[in-house]
Image: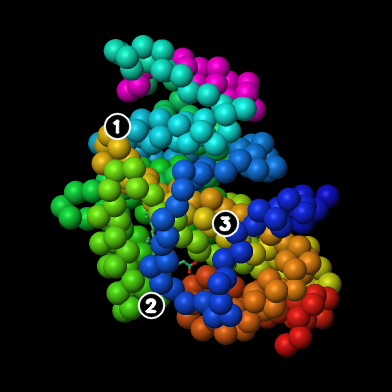
């Protein structure tokens, strides 16, 4: 079975197609969001297994600077509330005692029934952020706010698209975005930064980002470049007919949430993948993707790492898919 065979009509229906227009440019594209910020889909177990495998091989994907421990608890509890609200048939969070703040957390999907005291590390089998990230598909970064800046000081990131959380941890928001072309000259980074600093408790916003990924790999972080970098070459040099199964549009749905107790900002990154064959079943999507790829300026394509693959993707969409160039 190839990675492409694991995607079904359900995935097409739930895919957050990221292009409202035929042209894509960077912007501070945020919109207010409802309470359903964490989503469980058909890939739940497979993606959690993949996260566990990656963390076991490379523990640097999980980081929590010491001053972020309260924020990690805050994040865990917020995420448990989100999960229990969104999936009450599978998950529940019950307050057992007011003082100390003890809870019972149940996740029937993973056969978990855990009692813990908020803030007491010895009542959980793992650190709070690792614990909850073992039960949801989203990657998480926690940002501390101090000296009028946001700092990426904690997180669990196993599915990074061409960056390294282990390298970025402890950096400011503006430093983290240093490598992105256009973001600074067009003042998008400072605008986004101001926006995040002003987020109020319980407010949440979402944005999307996108790229192309070969063979459905979730872990395309800097650390594993030797494993996934070559896939791009075998795709661009390989048979065109394989591209529908091998090339994926990758959308990240990102949420920004001000945490209520610690005042940290939680950044959720959820990665959705969809193979080109599935996109080709919807002519409007196929056509729009083609136009966006065709139009994308070289510096952006280069930064996204798609200079080798976008041409093959476009050829496949117009040869085997429904697109008329
Ligand atoms: C409104 C908020 C934000 C905006 C507008 C924004 C914008 C962007 C854009 C346009 C890119 C380039 C993506 C691409 O071409 O594929 C990017 C990359 C990135 N963003 Fe953000 N971002 C935001 C929030 C955040 C937050 C809160 C974090 C977490 C610390 C973050 C971490 C990153 C990282 C790690 C990269 C990759 C940088 C690299 O290549 O090393 N972003 N961002």
Q: Which tag is nearer the camera, tag 2 or tag 3? A: 2
The tag earlier along the polypeptide, 2 or 1, is 1
* Residue placed under numbered mark 1 in the picture: 70
Q: CA distance from mark 2 to mark 1?
A: 35 Å
Residue 51 in the image, given as x and y percentages of width and height: 58, 40
Stretch in magenta: 104-120
Task: Name, please, the residue furthest toward the left.
Answer: 147
Residue name at image x 55 percent, y 21 percent: 106
* Residue placed under numbered mark 3 in the picture: 220
Residue 42 in the image, given as x and y percentages of width and height: 70, 42
Residue name at image x 70 percent, y 55 percent: 13
* Residue placed under numbered mark 2 in the picture: 182
The residue closer to the viewer here, 98 or 127, is: 98
The residue closer to the viewer here, 129 or 303, is: 129
Number of labelled discs?
Answer: 3
Q: CA distance from mark 1 to mark 3?
A: 30 Å
Residue name at image x 53 percent, y 50 percent: 270
With respect to residue 107, does 205 lie above or below?
Answer: below
Pick the quarter of the image with the C terminus.
bottom right
The tag earlier along the polypeptide, 2 or 3, is 2
The reply, left or right, for residue 134 in relation to residue 117 is right
With respect to residue 37, does 276 lie above or below?
Answer: below
């Amino acid at each position: 079975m190839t990675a492409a065979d694991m995607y079904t009509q359900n995935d097409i229906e739930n895919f957050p197609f990221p292009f409202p227009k035929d042209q894509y440019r960077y912007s501070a594209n945020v919109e207010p969001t409802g309470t359903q910020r964490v989503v469980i889909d058909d890939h739940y177990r497979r993606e959690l297994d993949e996260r566990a495998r990656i963390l076991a091989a490379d523990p640097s994907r999980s980081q929590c600077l010491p001053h972020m421990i309260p924020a990690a608890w805050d994040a865990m509890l917020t995420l448990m509330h989100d999960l229990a609200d969104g999936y009450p048939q599978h998950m529940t969070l019950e307050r057992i005692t007011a003082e100390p703040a003890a809870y019972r957390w149940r996740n029937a999907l993973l056969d978990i029934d855990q009692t813990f005291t908020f803030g007491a590390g010895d009542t959980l089998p793992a650190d709070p952020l690792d614990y909850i990230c073992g039960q949801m598909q989203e990657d998480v970064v926690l940002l501390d706010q101090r000296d009028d800046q946001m700092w990426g000081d904690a997180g669990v990131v196993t599915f990074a698209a061409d960056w390294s959380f282990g390298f970025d941890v402890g950096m400011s928001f503006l430093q983290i975005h240093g490598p992105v072309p256009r973001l600074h000259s067009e003042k998008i980074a400072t605008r986004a930064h101001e926006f995040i600093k002003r987020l109020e408790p319980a407010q949440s916003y979402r944005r999307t980002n996108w790229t192309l990924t070969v063979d459905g790999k979730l872990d395309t972080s800097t650390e594993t470049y030797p494993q996934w970098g070559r896939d791009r070459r075998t795709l661009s040099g390989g048979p065109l007919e394989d591209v529908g199964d091998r090339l994926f549009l990758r959308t990240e749905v990102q949420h920004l949430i001000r945490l209520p107790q610690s005042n940290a900002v939680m950044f959720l990154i959820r990665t959705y993948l969809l193979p080109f064959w599935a996109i080709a079943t919807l002519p409007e999507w196929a056509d729009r993707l083609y136009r966006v790829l065709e139009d994308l300026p070289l510096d952006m394509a280069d930064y996204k790492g798609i200079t080798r693959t976008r041409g093959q993707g476009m050829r496949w969409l117009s040869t085997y898919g429904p697109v008329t160039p």
